[in-house]
Amino acid sequence: MSEQAHGPEHESAHPEAHEGQGVHVEKWEGIWIRISVAMVFVFILAIVISATAFGISVPGASGRMDPATLNDADNPFSQPGLRELAPGKYEAYIVAQTWNFLPDRIEVPVGSQVTFHITARDVIHGFKLAGTNVNVMALPGQVATLSATFDTPGDYNYICHEYCGYVSGAPIGHHTMYGVLTVLPADAAEATQSTN
Amino acid sequence: MSVQAMPAIGIKEQPLPAALTAKDLKTIDRIAGINIVVAVLALSIGALFGVFQGLEHAKVFNIYPFLQPVIKTYYQGLTLHGALNAVVWTTFFICGFFTFVFPRSFNRPLRYPWLSWVAVITMIVGLVTAAVPMLTNNATVLYTFYPPMLAEWSFYLGLTLLVVGSWIVGFNFYFTYYAWRKENPDKRAPFLALAITITMVMWQIATLGVAAEILFILLPNALAPVLGFPAPGLDPLLSRTLFWWFGHPLVYFWLLPAYVSWYGMMPAQTNGKMFSEPLARLVFWLFLLLSTPVGFHHQYADPGIPEIWKFIHMVLTMGVGFPSLITAFTVVASLEIGARARGGKGYLRWIGRLNWGDPSYAGQNLAMILFIFGGIGGIINASYNVNMAVHNTMWVPGHFHLTVGSAVTLSFFAIAYWLVPKLTGHKLFTKWMALAQVWTWFFGMLFFSNAYHTLGLLFSVPRRTMLGEAPYYDSAWNPQMMESVLGLVFLSISATLFFAIMLFTWIIPRKLDKPIEMPVAEPLNPNPAPKWLDTWWPWLNGAIALVIISYGPMLFQLISNMTTWSKGIRVW
């Protein structure tokens, strides 16, 4: 069995003599490279504009909290749930744990702005509010904070989207871990308030 | 007459080139063959679980109750699917393919052939060590193994050995490269050998992150109960960050071997030439430079990492898209040369004259077409705030079944269609089966990934979830679920064909029509590439500097504020 030498063989003893240091680029290839560079810059620019002008951002630096302290009386996560800060402004403390969210029902009137504080008790969980950009990882030791305004009435599922375990035969597991945020229409919200 | 000493100036001692003998080739081919057998076996099990998962998602058939004696849960199967397909199939195939090509490209034996044996044995011992806890449901942590979820120690030890084995493959290439350079100081390294070495060096830098995670965080915690010392505890965010240092360049470790073939081999399979050999080198150098400092784009949704670092990694991720954009032009131009040499005419009609009758060519071309969509999806995922719409939804498996599942895997199938006949000396069984295989994979993945992308984007359906049992399952998902099942039907046929082709080609000694040569594309322009495209220090130092700049400050902060609050937990 014999094999030929493969690949470019350049036998010149002095390759520098007949070659520059530049790369020869064909006309259309050069045009495509310029288009590629322009595309990359346009994409980055679009992201910068959407993040600054429209304020669409990603979770950032956060608070830290020892998961062992979540049940302490002075810890806001010891009473997970919704708190009204001002009319139309709420904050929600949510604990993700195997295998449920505390709380798993939240109701707010339409037009409300809700600031979510989310942490995990045991392993890593996920939190995505279906149909919205509210999407964050819940990590033990970290408190994620993000807010959203709800202008359309309806039920929004918040679903754990990071695998967090399941024991064979158990009635609950990662795939049953979800909650529902209900945005009440204006009249229903008033009705609820008046009955309270 | 006087005797003058010869002037010593100008005479450098140059070792004689070592010849590549038939004996060397036999060893190389045996090692390559072992790698490919392991790769294909791993894929056969991994792919089977993929079908089970897809059928469960669509509520067509939940097989898991029937697998009970062996496989306890959906998630144990999912761990096997991810680990066997994304890690074992890829790594073993790549190491086998590279071991075959690298010495032939240099036309020189490996510097230490025994080191290749050490490498492949280390990898196999690692695979077996990690497979035992996975198969006994003691490591159901998925292939990302995010702590505090903690597997049995042997899972981490096995993974470590697998990675160390792949490092040894690289080390042997570096020694060989160095020896070749000594023998050939004025030549340009052949493209294939250079591209392979760059890929292995990139892998070396990338795997440092996961090596640190395993050695300093996971193994101490996993070994604590075995050795009887108190578990030190761990920081989930630091662990994730070290994982994703590795997790994204991992995808380039899968992709670059396909690029090696697309640039340096595939044009020769359709009578083409490398349109622009120096640019191909530049593309590989850019991947060395930009593959690693991009990992935070997998952590856009993580709390605890400031937005500015996510933004910096976003810019670098967009940058690593650039060499793939060049590839889209340059590889297609190389193929067009071939199509025109085969009589192709017109602006687009030449496409029909490509070597579509050869399954090895057709498979790679179809892989490229799917990678157009995979690449566009990748740019969307990288787009910072846009990612919030799709992060951890079914969009993501939709995406990576186009990239690693199609661009890479379909290319590897196609490479196997010349490589396995070459290694066995048997004719491919058969050309028509192989053509059917690559086309069914193409259409299967098209339907499957389209359905999953849509489920994620429209309905926020979560990934990594036993959806058929989920209380929030919505009948609105049915059309896409049915589309994904259609894709699965094609994929099941395709996978079955692939394993049959591999098995029958191996065991049935059909005589080859003519000896098989490794395809090598010659450059269109015979002038050698400039020396700066054959010089390591600027690129290697640049890559290290970029990793330090983009990871250094954040890692310093994470390590100096490290907590040990979390303890390893078994939640399966």
Image: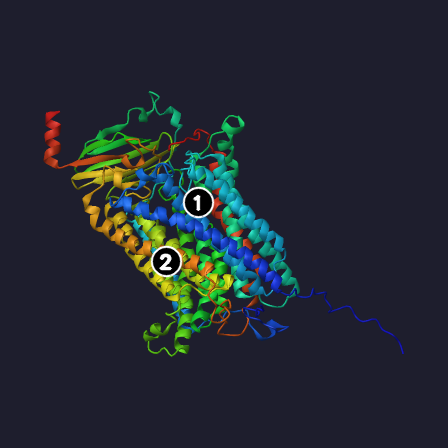
Asked if badge 1 and badge 2 are on a common chain, one would say: yes
B564 w.r.t. B456: above or below? above
Query: Please, what is the three-letter code of the amino acid marked with disc 1?
Result: Trp
Image position, residue B94 (x, y; %): 48, 55
The residue drawn where x is 40% and y is 48% is: B45
Quarter of the view holding residue B413 = bottom left
Q: Would you name the residue on which mark 1 appears? A: B244
Image quarter in which the C terminus of chain B is found: top left
B425 w.r.t. A85: above or below? below
Q: Between residue B560 and residue B28, name the one nearer to us.
A: B28
Image position, residue B1 (x, y; %): 90, 78
Image position, residue A77 (x, y; %): 32, 27
The residue drawn where x is 39% and y is 71% is: B355
Q: Which mark is residue A52?
A: none
Query: Please, what is the three-letter code of the amino acid marked with disc 2?
Result: Leu
Left or right, B473 with reference to B112: left
Q: Would you name the residue on which mark 2 appears? A: B497
Label 1 environment density (alpha carbons within 10 Å; few <14, some 14–19, many ≥20): many
